[in-house]
Image (cartoon, coloured by chain):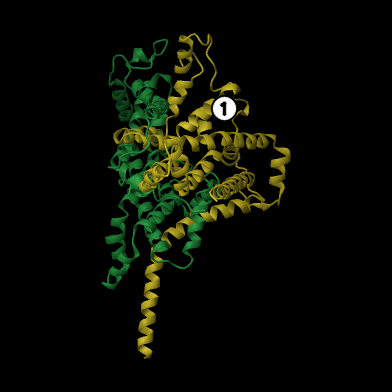
Chain colours: A yellow, B green
């Protein structure tokens, strides 16, 4: 009896061990490279830290300085929100409309179309081409094109004139915005139960626009949620592409964002405590906005 | 699932609407493809066409000279170019395999073995989808330094193993596509969990890991520079190409050729596994 018990418990113990061996590698790495860094970033945001000496606690000083003494941060915050407010929803709608329209087209066109629209995301690094297209001298393709059409007589400084910089950025961001969210939409639309459409037809739905509104959209709410998370996160984090195309700092800090401000203090000035305060604010913005939009999307369906 | 509607007749479709949509797609399609076509066209231009004024969009006398130039530049660089290629391939392949394997195993543990506390961890992974790596860059650097991986390719590869998107996609797919009954039957037959995982689960979720492979590979492949890498001989292929692009206007043609070359590999990988991607992403939805 005693022996049977130990055998039993040994087997349980072994099962537990095997079970945990499945999740442990990921858990350790995820903790090490994601969870721990978030916690450390928040803790360091309350310190002065320059990578050389031990950090010392300054409590809220970094945050106070950010909001009261750093006018560039306030500008970066505004720019980030403006850029996110434009590219987030536009990118989201663009992804969805593209996915939906592709699905309306014949199969072959759809396959090629998906590749055409996803290729920019695959391309990763097309900065050189954007620089050539938008180059500020008469050799820039867009400038020479407009000049040939007679629409302008002198080249426009697309990358240095504040009037054009934001639109140019929006174009570049939208161009590469059809990522995982877009693929999720493509799949979600194809996965809608066909019998729903047939039933709807019997119930008097007469065209594709009504189908879209009454059936397709409500059927793929989980994909919409996923797509929303993807586009909120990326639209608030726009930074590297700005530095690559517009340089750092962008002319007159026109396109200075939280992400580029963070790069400046973390990557160049080594004021790590301050940079971590910036990172913590960005973290709060991203997670907060995601939560709000999630709640809001969930309510729409009720 | 994705193919279910293949033979069904589409209802309520007006010809006018179809034409309108085709025009719309074509317009946006042109917007998407123009930079890529432009770079292909640039890469085929002979020297005199690169510098004609006004610049022309399409190449008139295509030549592969720029590719040959690129090849020569590669051959004469101080660090052998094969070294850059090796670094990129090594990072992409090892990072992708590790990411697929480790996320799949964890996804299995969460949704099929229902390990205690794993649901909480999954919620954290979903939360991690909501912020980008920018946020954790500084402490991430400290962690890598602590591990002694500064100036080592492992600094790029190992963190990629635990990218949150990987676990998320694998878990969603497994949950919806792998029937529990099947696993129960295998257990009764005496199969070990590892055997079940590799012989049954991974076979069923093939579309999912092929998709994850694309995401992972694409991200690692396009990696340019990294704050962890100093030594020239540990830099990536993309970094070397961007150096060529940055080395001045005289190499515009070679630069365009370089960007075409970088684009080629992920596009081929995507074409090969496109139908799997669609099947996988159908389960990617997020519940509120």
**Residue placed most toward the observer, B274 or A265:** B274
Label 1: chain? Answer: A
- Check the image and name the residue furthest to the bottom: A1
Q: Please tell me which residue is depicted at 46% across the width and 68% down the height of the picture.
A: B116
Q: Residues within 10 Å of mark 1 (few under 14, many from 20)?
A: some
Image coords of residue B44 (percent x, y)? 31, 20
Q: Is residue B51 visible?
A: yes
Residue A84 against residue B73 in the figure, above or below: below
Of B73 and B102, nearer the camera is: B102
From this viewpoint, is residue B80 visible?
A: no
Quadrant for residue A175, please give it.
Answer: top left
Q: Position of residue A159 (x, y in %)?
A: 54, 23
- Res. A278 image quadrant: top right
Q: Position of residue B284 (x, y in %)?
A: 42, 50
Q: Is residue A119 above or below residue B60?
A: below
Please tell me in which quadrant of the rendered image residue A4 appears: bottom left
The number of numbered discs placed on residues in the rendered structure image is: 1
**Position of residue B12 in the picture relative to residue A48 (left or right):** left
Q: Secondary structure at mark 1?
A: helix
In the picture of the structure, the residue carrying the numbered disc 1 is: A166
Tell me the quarter of the image containing the N terminus of chain A.
bottom left
Classify A4 as above or below B34: below
Rendered position, A85 above or below A18: above
Q: Residue A106's x, y, as percent? A: 31, 34
């Amino acid at each position: 009896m005693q022996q049977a018990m130990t055998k039993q418990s040994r087997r349980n113990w072994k099962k537990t061990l095997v079970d945990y061996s499945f999740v442990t590698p990921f858990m350790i790495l995820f903790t090490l490279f994601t969870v721990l860094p978030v916690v450390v970033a928040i803790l360091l945001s309350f310190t002065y830290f320059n990578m050389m000496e031990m950090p010392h606690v300054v409590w809220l000083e970094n945050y106070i300085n950010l909001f009261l003494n750093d006018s560039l941060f306030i500008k970066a915050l505004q720019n980030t929100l403006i850029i996110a407010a434009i590219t987030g929803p536009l990118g989201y709608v663009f992804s969805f409309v593209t996915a939906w329209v592709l699905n309306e087209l014949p199969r072959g066109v759809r396959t090629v179309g998906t590749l055409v629209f996803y290729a920019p995301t695959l391309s990763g690094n097309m900065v050189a081409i954007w620089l050539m297209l938008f180059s500020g001298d008469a050799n820039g393709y867009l400038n020479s094109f407009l000049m040939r059409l007679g629409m302008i007589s002198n080249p426009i400084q697309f990358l240095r004139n504040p009037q054009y910089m934001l639109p140019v950025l929006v174009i570049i961001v939208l161009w590469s915005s059809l990522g995982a969210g877009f693929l999720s939409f493509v799949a979600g639309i194809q996965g809608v139960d066909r019998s729903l459409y047939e039933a709807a037809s019997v119930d008097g739905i007469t065209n594709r626009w009504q189908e879209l509104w009454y059936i397709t959209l409500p059927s793929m709410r989980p994909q919409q949620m996923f797509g929303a998370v993807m586009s909120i996160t990326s639209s608030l984090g726009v930074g590297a592409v700005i530095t690559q195309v517009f340089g750092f700092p962008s002319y007159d800090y026109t396109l200075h964002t939280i992400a580029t401000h963070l790069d400046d203090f973390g990557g160049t000035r080594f004021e790590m405590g301050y940079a971590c305060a910036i990172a913590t604010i960005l973290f709060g913005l991203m997670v907060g906005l995601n939560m709000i939009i999630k709640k809001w999307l969930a309510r729409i369906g009720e | 699932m994705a193919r279910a509607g293949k033979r069904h007749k589409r209802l309520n479709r007006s010809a006018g609407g179809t034409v309108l949509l085709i025009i719309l797609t074509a317009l946006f399609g042109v917007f998407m493809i123009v930079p890529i076509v432009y770079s292909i066209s640039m890469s085929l231009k002979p020297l005199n066409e690169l510098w004609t004024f006004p610049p022309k969009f399409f190449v008139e006398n295509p030549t592969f000279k720029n590719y040959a130039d690129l090849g020569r530049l590669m051959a004469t660089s101080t660090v052998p170019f094969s070294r850059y290629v090796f670094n990129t391939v090594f990072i992409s392949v090892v990072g992708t395999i590790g990411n697929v394997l480790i996320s799949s195993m964890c996804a299995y543990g969460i949704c099929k073995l229902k390990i205690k506390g794993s649901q909480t961890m999954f919620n954290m992974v979903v939360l991690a989808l909501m912020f980008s790596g920018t946020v954790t860059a500084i402490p991430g650097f400290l962690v890598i330094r602590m591990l002694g991986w500064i100036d080592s390719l492992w600094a790029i590869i190992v963190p990629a193993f635990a990218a949150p998107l990987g676990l998320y996609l694998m878990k969603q797919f497994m949950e919806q596509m792998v029937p529990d009954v099947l696993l129960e039957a295998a257990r009764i037959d005496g199969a070990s969990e590892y055997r079940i995982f590799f012989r049954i689960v991974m076979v069923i979720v093939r579309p999912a890991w092929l998709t994850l492979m694309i995401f992972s590979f694409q991200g690692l492949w396009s990696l340019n520079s990294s704050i962890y890498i100093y030594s020239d001989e540990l830099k990536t292929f993309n970094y070397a190409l961007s150096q060529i692009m940055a080395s001045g206007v005289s190499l515009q043609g070679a630069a365009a050729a370089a960007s075409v070359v970088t684009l080629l590999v992920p596009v081929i990988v995507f074409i090969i596994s496109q139908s799997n991607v669609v099947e996988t992403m159908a389960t990617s939805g997020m519940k509120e």
